[in-house]
Image (spheres, rainbow, N blue to C red):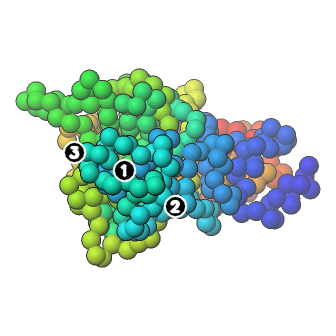
Amino acid sequence: MNIFFHFLKNQLNMKRLLPIILLLNFISHAQLQPALFQFKTDTVIRWHYQFGEEFSSKSIDENRWYLRYPWGGLLLDQKQWAVPEMIDVQNGNLELKAVEVNKNVKVENWMINQAQAKELQIDIKNDSVYLDYLTSCLWSKDTFRYGYFECRAIVPEGKGLWPAFWLYGQNQKDEIDFMEMKGERSHDIHVDVHLPNRKDYVKNAFGLKKNWGGWVRMKNQLVGEPVIYSGIWLPNSLTYFVNGVPVSHFDGDFETPMNIVLNLAVARDGFAFNPGPDAQTKFPATFKVDYLRVWQLDAQMPLIKANFPKLEVANSKEAQAEVKKPITLIYPKKKLAQEQGFVTIIPINWHSYEVQANGISSLEVSAWVGAEQHPEFLKGMTIELLNAPKELEIELKVGSQKIRFKPQ
């Protein structure tokens, strides 16, 4: 067994190794498990890994994903169609593409809304439809109810480009939009919810109902940069984050489990999220997704109040997000001020973890056996368990909160 793991260590990089480790950890003596810790000003919450894609294979696993919208994805009124051919995996990234075609394209007959075609006076011959764009969509076959959902992605620059990361309910009514972007709005993210029976409203100071959601402006640039988009969906609660920083909160719930959707569309003039592209918009355009992960809630972990020595660990680039213009109605400042960020512990081989900080302003990591500190089991942002005793504990400290856990 050890020979096999040493082979994997030498042959595969971290992103390629993670899915294999998750599969083999049941037969490994080390039993390395990914974990995520949510730090708040008054507590630390542990989450466990449920589902994810590191996009380390050469293709998408079609046992887990639809490579198009299940209903077909042909938009006759907007002259675009999401097709599997616009999905690729390169260098550990999912690539969702959009291209300009400006010609008749052969489509599958069952996708054509004949009544809409007649209303729009579209002449369809031999199932050939004139299209301006081919776009892309990845849709999970599994459904999820509650959890922490996150993806790390790079949004393409260009007027009219419209990438999104969202959940869609089995009742075809509920929807959670963790992220919608426009390629021309470099610092803005659009968050939203959709519920039947007008349950997606909030009341302002005068008691008037307003639509929940809208554009949130960040101080740092989002378009063209690697950003972690995420959200926590709990019963009667939904909180959105950009690089671990909370940007909005919704009090309410949704009726059904939901599918995960990643897509790149093209906005059109006169439709949702207009304007559409202009002459400067570059095609093909690519929405790159580094990873997608879903975490489920574990029991709340006990806190260690003792003042132990510390070992400083550098923060990642994603920790620098800051809201510039919050939407007051969906930004409960007092509640969101409790959020301090996330620390993810990811296995990178059979005996090591990498520590990833998201939204953390100051993270301290230390290794302990009883009351004695053992820095030799830490190498920068890596926890090294080779030759480590089973009694070893890792301590994470953010602000006044700290947590200890056994990494093996």
The residue labelled by disc 2 is 86
Mark 1 crowd level (few <14, some 14–19, many ≥20, 10 Å Cα): some
Residue drawn at 70 percent across, 38 percent down: 406
Q: Amino acid at mark 2?
A: Met
Of circles 1 and 3, the one toward us is: 1
Left or right, residue 77 beside residue 109: left
| C-alpha span from label 3 to label 2 | 35 Å
Of circles 1 and 2, the one toward us is: 1
| Earlier-in-chain disc, 1 versus 3 | 1
Residue 103 visible: yes
The residue labelled by disc 1 is 75
Write down the quadrant of residue 177 in the picture: top left
Indicate the position of residue 192 as horizontal and vertical percent values. Answer: 31, 41
Write down the quadrant of residue 24 in the picture: top right
User: Secondary structure beneath disc 1?
Assistant: strand
| Earlier-in-chain disc, 3 versus 2 | 2
Is 327 situated above or below 296? below
**Residue at the far front in the pictured view:** 125
Indicate the position of residue 40 as horizontal and vertical percent values. Answer: 43, 38
Residue in front for this viewpoint, 302 or 16: 16
User: Secondary structure beneath disc 2?
Assistant: helix
Residue in front for this viewpoint, 34 or 389: 34
Q: Amino acid at mark 1?
A: Leu
The residue labelled by disc 3 is 327
Residue drawn at 55 percent across, 60 percent down: 85
Q: Amino acid at mark 3?
A: Ile
| C-alpha span from label 1 to label 2 | 16 Å
Left or right, residue 291 beside residue 406: left
Residue in front for this viewpoint, 76 or 149: 76
